[in-house]
Structure formats: C-alpha cells, structure tokens
Image: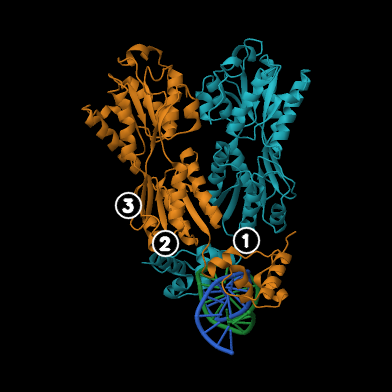
Chain colours: A orange, B cyan, C green, D blue
Amino acid sequence: VKKPKSSIKDVALLAGVSTATVSHVINKTRFVSEETSRKVNEVITELEYLPSAAARGLAGKESKIISVIFSDISNPFFTSVFMGLESVLAGEGYELILVNTGEEIENQEKALRTMLSRQIDGLIIAPTGRESHMLNQLVDVGIPVVLIDREAPVDNVFLVDLDNEYAAHQAITHLINDGHQQIGVLLGLPEVSTTRTRLNGYQKAIDEHNIPFRPEYLFQGHSRIEGGYEGVKYFLDLDQPPTAIFSMNNMMTLGVLHAFKEIGIECPNDLGLVGFDDHDWGNIFTPSLTVVRQPTYEMGVIAAKMLISNTESTYRNHERLTGELVIRESCSKKCQQHFKKNISHKFIPKSE
Amino acid sequence: VKKPKSSIKDVALLAGVSTATVSHVINKTRFVSEETSRKVNEVITELEYLPSAAARGLAGKESKIISVIFSDISNPFFTSVFMGLESVLAGEGYELILVNTGEEIENQEKALRTMLSRQIDGLIIAPTGRESHMLNQLVDVGIPVVLIDREAPVDNVFLVDLDNEYAAHQAITHLINDGHQQIGVLLGLPEVSTTRTRLNGYQKAIDEHNIPFRPEYLFQGHSRIEGGYEGVKYFLDLDQPPTAIFSMNNMMTLGVLHAFKEIGIECPNDLGLVGFDDHDWGNIFTPSLTVVRQPTYEMGVIAAKMLISNTESTYRNHERLTGELVIRESCSKKCQQHFKKNISHKFIPKSE
DNA sequence: CTGAAAGCGCTTACAG
DNA sequence: CTGAAAGCGCTTACAG
C-alpha cells in the first residue's frame, strides 16, 4: 500500500518552473518572484512534498544530524545532558543520533566509524579517555567535536566539563569540617579523566588538614551500583574502617544506600556519605544526601551551542563549569568511634 | 586541515576494477573472485575508505537509521526501553535517532515530519495517543512502525505494550487485601491510553469487592513529579482521605515520596502506596516500595525484533506483556482510621 | 528574475 | 566472473 513520494522534479513540473527554482524557494537561497514563489509553495503542500535528506546530504549540504555518544544512558547524568543538548539543537533543526557505549572502547570506535560514513554535522561525546584512532580521524576530516564531562587525548576539539578537582575538594573539606578524618573513596573508572581529577581534589583536601593518605581507603567501584555496594562491605571489613564515604558518582551512591539499608547502617551516625551528582531521590532518602550537584542540563546547552557557533568568539575551546555542594543530612558526624565495633556482627551478605 | 575522503571511484581506480565490483565486494552481493576481492579490500583499508551513507540511501538502499520517539527520556522507563532497543538494533548495524517530545503533540508531529524526509528504515514511538496526521502518512509511505507502551489511532502498525488493566487490577486487589477500602488514584495523562486501561483495572478491582467508586479519589497528576506531590496534598485535604494511594507512574511516585517526607507521613501506616514501574530507589526507600514492575528492557527488545523481522511469522502484530507485582513494604495497613485526623495540623506547604 | 546541466557517491539492471 | 552506464533527488556554479 505504498504511496509514492514525490520529488523535486514533480514539484517543478507541476509548478511550471525548473528544479533550481524550487530548490531556491525552499532554501530561500536566491530571490524568486513572489508569484512563482507562491505557486511553488502551493504545489509543495498539494503534493505533500518533503525534500529527501539523503539527496541533500549527497549534494553537499549539511545533514542536520549530530551524533551523541554516551557511556551510560541509564545514568540520569547523561539523560539530563541529553535534554540540554536537545533544547538548543532541536530548535535549529538538528536530529540526534544517540549511541550508548556501555563504557566499552570497542563500541565507541565502532560507533565513531559509522559516524564517519554518515554525513554528520558534529559529534558530542563523553569519551572513554583512552587513545581513540577514530576520534582523531573524525577531527581530521573536519567534523566539529565537543568532548563533554571528560577529557581525552585529541587535539582541535571543544571541551565542556566540571572543575572536578575543586568540587571534590569542596566535598571532602565539608566532610572533614563535619568531624571526619577517615574518608573512604569509591573510585570511578580508572580510564575516565574525572576519576583522576576528583581524586586530586580529595588528596588536596586531606593534605591541607594533615590527614595521612591511606591507599586502603580507595576502592574501585567502576561507577556502578554494584561497585558502591561492594565498596561499603569492603570498607567495613577493614581493621580501621573509614567514618565516611565519598562516592564519585550517583550509581555508586545508589549501591551504597542499598548496602546501608541491608546491613542496617544508620547514616550519618554510623557512616557519613557525600556523593557526586544530584537527583530527586537524594532528597527523599533518609537522611537526605549531601552531594555535589553538577549543572548537567547546562553542560548540554553549552556543548550544543559550542558545536553550532561558527563564530568562535562566543566560546573558548574549553568551558569549565563549577559544581555546587548541596548540603543536606548525610555528613554530620556525631560520634567519633569507628562504626565497625558496633555492627560488624549484623553483617548480612547479599544473597545472589 | 581537512583530509579529503576517498570515494568508491578512488578505490576502483587504485584496485583496477569497476565501481560495480567494489560495491559488490563491500556488500557481498554477487560473487567476486578471491583475488580481486582481496585486492579491493587491501585498497579499502589503505585509503581508509568508508562508503557514504547518504549516497547509499539515495541509491535506494536502506539508511540503517531507525527513529525513536519518546515523550520523556528522563523517565527511567524510557531509558530502559531504549537500551533494550539498542541491544538488538546495534548488532544489526542500525543507528537510532532519539527525539524527546516532552509529551507535546506539536513536537511529535514535527519530529515525524522530519523522519518522513529522512530515509528511515523504521520508527518506534510511544505516541501521545491523539490523532496524528504525520503518523498515518509515515505508514502510508511504507515505513514500518511499532507503537510501544501506548496505543494510538493508526492502522497497519505493530504494538507492544503491557496488559495494563490486569496489572492495575492486581495492584489494587493487593491493596484491598491489605485492608484498604479507600484508594486514591494518581492519574497519568488523559490522552495516553495507559491511563485509561489502568483506571479500568482499578475500577474492576473495587467493583469485585463492592467498594463504591468515588470520583474525588481521582487526581490528575500528569505523570509528573509535581503531580504526585500535589496529589498527596489534595487527598489529605479531602473530608475522608484515602488510606492508600495508587500511583500510575514512577515520576508521580517520586512526588508522593517527597510529600510524605515533607509532611512527615509514615508509610504504610499513615498512608499505603502502590506504584507503577520499578527502580533501584524503590528498594532503598523506607519503606521499600510495592510496585508493578514492567519488563521495560524486554519491551524494547521485542519492539526492535518486530521492526526488523521481515518474516511476519515470528511475531503477531500485537505483543502484550505481563507486569509483575513486586510486593515490598509500602502497602500493608495496620491501623484502620483515616490518617487525616492525626496529622493534618503538621501540614507544611512546599515553599516555592 | 530564472533555467539547463553537471555532479555528489553510491547501487543495480543489463550485457557479455 | 566483471564492466559501462543509468539513475536515486537534490544543490549550485554558469549563463542569460
């Protein structure tokens, strides 16, 4: 039951003009007399004509497609960034191809390869951080790319990220001021740049307070729920468990809360918690969560504007935003002894 | 610093064959001697040749683009569906254009119009439910479309959804068995089909238990956080407030929990709660939430498979899945009097 | 103020 | 086993 689509030729024929004229009235790319212009538009609506994006792309114009490559779209951080992107790009007539790499470099490379064969007008990517052959190739070919959230070893790209070191420093300092000296860290993925910069902020904060660095207070949580969950178990099994936890992202924070509930840990009295990324449940949970809020939507907006601004004047190549420490209830320590002494006997491992 | 991309002509020239042959070795669409085939592939890697998707599309082949139109990508329901879609489609070489309508019919129509001008291979959409001219046109033009989660007035489309009536019936029956006779409902958007079917399930369940239907127990929450929050306030202001709330989606449930925390409502003793959609925080919250879990990821998988299965045999035009009632702690009522009597004096309106 | 025509980079009958 | 060539539906110098 296919209805044949009409082409620019059909329009030209019916309107009694050339295809060039039709093209020009559609794109407003040269003057056309009002009369013919009207006639052409009439025929267009009559035939329900829509120009073929493929033909347009081939003929050398922009594709109006921008590719977005994220690592984990189930993370609200990225959906919020996406909405920020969309808010400016949709208005400009762009469509977004979204691909989810699941943090796998092979998926990223494969996606980038496809993008290279498409006529994309730009790329917005939260890169894995490892060397990427395809990313360099995309840049070489002249496609504008903006890195978001994370750095990567490429030149001639835009970058919008958070001042992660400052944000982490702020969070840890807050924890210290609330009486914590032993602070466990749930690390994000090692190959992602934010893990390093947030750790730097931690280091700097404890240094400033002459708190010794303890490698056993670092746990690799892989930015995943399970990692946060396992991390709590790990910390409590230490001879001298930390009195507070710094979680480097919201997924791990969720895992921490899981563990807290399961083990019966009362936060912040038993164990303090400061997280990265804010969300509605952060406010609902008891205690409500003290977190570093990232301006996620705004990051998307800026990235999008960078990409489509041909005037380089508006933005620098690198826009660094500032996080906001949202102080709620999960940090303030009231008793100083280590939590382990009191509850280790009620530890219930997760049933698998 | 643009590096010129090489075309199929360049490859043909360097390999000493025709473009037809190059095309055929790439697509494996007719036999080519092993020797020339090898030679062609060598040249391809040497030139880092990648076929132009635009040209391919124009020349009549598939575009390998599938369009996904959702109403709210910040809702985990949709991100989970998206990941299900991606899990099968990425493997088949498809790219997904994602657009977020924010539940606005105009945005939907605009997006569909663009899709019509693109050479998309298929469309997966959670439609607003209202009559859509563009949707019909897409179908007319021969593009396969699958409706997901919701129905819409179109013919010749696939549909994958939940048995919403059954799911709601199950949830309400559970509430009734836990001792609730007054059950307030937070309605989803009126134009979305699931709102109607879930309400039917509610109606059926109370009918079966001879519980009178009370229109004042229905509150329009618009499937949004604010709606859930306002709903709780509304219900508690009734002369005879309900003893339990049925929330038709996870966003409204979040709003309910906000209100609970703010007003100081103890769930389930003060007010029971059963929600639609499951999420990690459902388990973390105290009390943990009793909800209808939808097989979201699976819905995505099935929708994707429907779309690309040319053999109509595998799937019917309509696949209806079954939700699972996950019983946790937020329903069982222990005291029978209406909650209002005890706490209305501590009511603190949200500061705006 | 408007047209004729080349060209974008593929695919695919048609031929041999 | 492989080529020459038409054609997909646009855009854009070039001409007038």
Q: Evaluate whether label 3 is on the same chain as label 2.
A: yes
Q: Mark 2 lies on which chain?
A: A
Q: Which mark is residue A311?
A: 2
Q: Is residue A229 left or right of residue B285?
A: left
Q: Mark 1 touching mark 2, by CB under 8 A?
A: no
Vertical relation: A106 (above or below) B190? below
Where in the figure is residue A246, as x and y percent of width and height? 35, 29
- Quarter where residue B41 is shown: bottom left
Q: Going from the N terminus, do you reach mark 3 or mark 2 first?
A: 3
Residue at 65%, 23% in the rendered image = B245
C-alpha gap between disc 1 and disc 3: 37 Å
Task: Name the amino acid type tagged 2.
Answer: Thr
Q: Mark 3 touching mark 2, by CB under 8 A?
A: no
C-alpha gap between disc 3 and disc 2: 25 Å
Task: Name the amino acid type tagged 3.
Answer: Pro
The residue to which callout 1 is attached is: B117
Task: Work out whether residue B260 can be spotted.
Answer: yes
The residue to which callout 3 is attached is: A153
- Quarter where residue B181 is shown: top right
Residue at 42%, 45% in the rendered image = A104
Label 2: how many Cα within 10 Å (few below 14, some 14–19, many 20+): few
